[in-house]
Image (tube, helix red, strand yellow):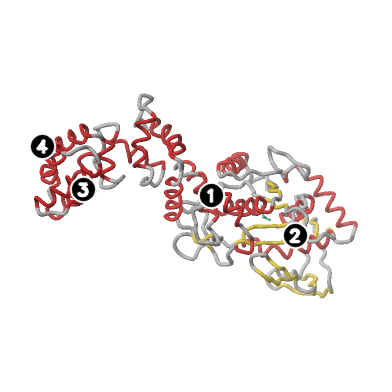
Amino acid sequence: MSQVRVRFAPSPTGFFHIGSARTALFNWLYARHTGGKFILRIEDTDKERNSEAFLNVILDSMRWLGMDWDEGPEVGGPHGPYFQSQRTGLYRAKLKELADKGRAYEKDGAWWLRLEGARTQAHDEHLKRDYEKVDSPPMVLDDLVRGRVERAEDRDFVIFRSNGEPVFHFVNVVDDIEMKITHVIRGEDHLSNTSKHVELFKAFGVEPPKYAHIPLILKTDGPGKMSKRDKGALIEEYQQRRYLPSAVRNYLCLLGWTPADGKEVLPIAEIVRQFELKDVHQSNARFDERKMSHVNALTLRGLPAAEFAALARPILAEAGVIDASVSDARLAEVLGIVQEKVVSLEHLPEFMGFFFSAEFRKDEGALANLTKKGGDPAARVRELLPALEAAEWSEPALEAAFAAVGAAHGRKPTDYFAPARFAVSGQGGGAHLLGVLRVLGRDATLARLRAYAS
Ligand code: GLU
């Protein structure tokens, strides 16, 4: 088979949302899986609605997600320019080609594609006009995702408007021909356009590409399609919230595709290896921000410690939690217990600031939980203190000290965990407590417990 050539063809008329990112990604995955080419083509014919700023957001987000393109803006390629706004001459020439063949004609100032087939006069109540109805056999499409789709165009349609601007269907097909696209992978919302596109391919005498219409992404609750206005819809948002691009990308892969063995968090090379269009789901995907955040947490956990530290240091420095005087070794100690628990890099300063300063924020909600039903956290800390003062500073020894205090006072050792955690960190949760005490160190821990108990 000839080399696979796929394209992502965004219109820069709005922010880059997860639906577009997922379409781009499935194209990219398929190109990388097959050793083919991934082309980025900018469909910017709508002069009023396109903007340079939106284009930059798209390019930026694609780079952030690691979707490199083989042909397109900035990298060029043999079929450029890759901006439709710069291809007007080509579209006019292709229109002429159809007109010369008798397959395009002018009416009311617009140019129409003439369908093949038997023509009968018809009247359209809705449009209140007469037109020629065409009896042509329905197009049968073997969509690589949807399976067999039948659809017929039964009337000629406009390909160049009376204002001289080409219509989306026309430029889309002309470019897919010129750029030698073999597979069109796009959102299911374009399925209804496909019969027009196939008619255009036939008019040009070109074999249409294979189509794969991928499922819609529904919003978290309810039946509707995820829109740009829904929370969590924009890729930029994840960038700003310091999600790992590899985690966002991993999550996007799961919107309409499942790895064969069900293991959902996996390296991109493995996804590329497994990705087949036939495995893309027919049913709609549902966006789930909690799952996205879970994938992010698992991805963070899986990072090599040095890589995690390299990401963490600038974030902590920017938040004023650490300065250059904090050694790599000390930072590594703290991160060593934090990495498995923190859900997002965004939370790191809040999550671990107390290791570096005794002036930490006290979580009122956590305190309320502690004192609920008459609990007295300060009393628990007072009971705990002597045992910790006497303990050797290791996790097993600290664990034994908690157990001994519990036994002595007729309580569970864990009754002491939350008060101790709150006293040293002001928090109701976080990294494993014994690890926190070990890494915080004997002096700081005892000083904070004493201050709290008094
Ligand atoms: N510019 C179209 C869009 O953004 C491209 C459709 C296609 O992939 O064919 O929806």
Q: Residues within 10 Å of mark 4 (few under 14, many from 20)?
A: few
Disc 3 Cβ-to-ligand 1 distance below 8 Å? no
- Say which element carries label 2: loop
- Say which element carries label 1: loop
Residue type at mark 4?
Ser
* Residue at image mark 3: 417
Quadrant of the snapshot with the C terminus:
top left
* Residue at image mark 2: 209
Q: Residues within 10 Å of mark 3 (few under 14, many from 20)?
A: some
Residue displayed at 53% across by 58% down = 255
311 lies left or right of 326? right
Q: What is the C-alpha distance between the residues marked 3 and 2?
A: 63 Å
Q: Report the front residue among 147 and 42.
A: 147
Q: Earlier in the sequence, mark 3 or mark 2?
A: 2
> In this rendering, which labeled residue sits more in front, label 2 or label 1?
1
445 lies above or below 174: above
Disc 2 Cβ-to-ligand 1 distance below 8 Å? no
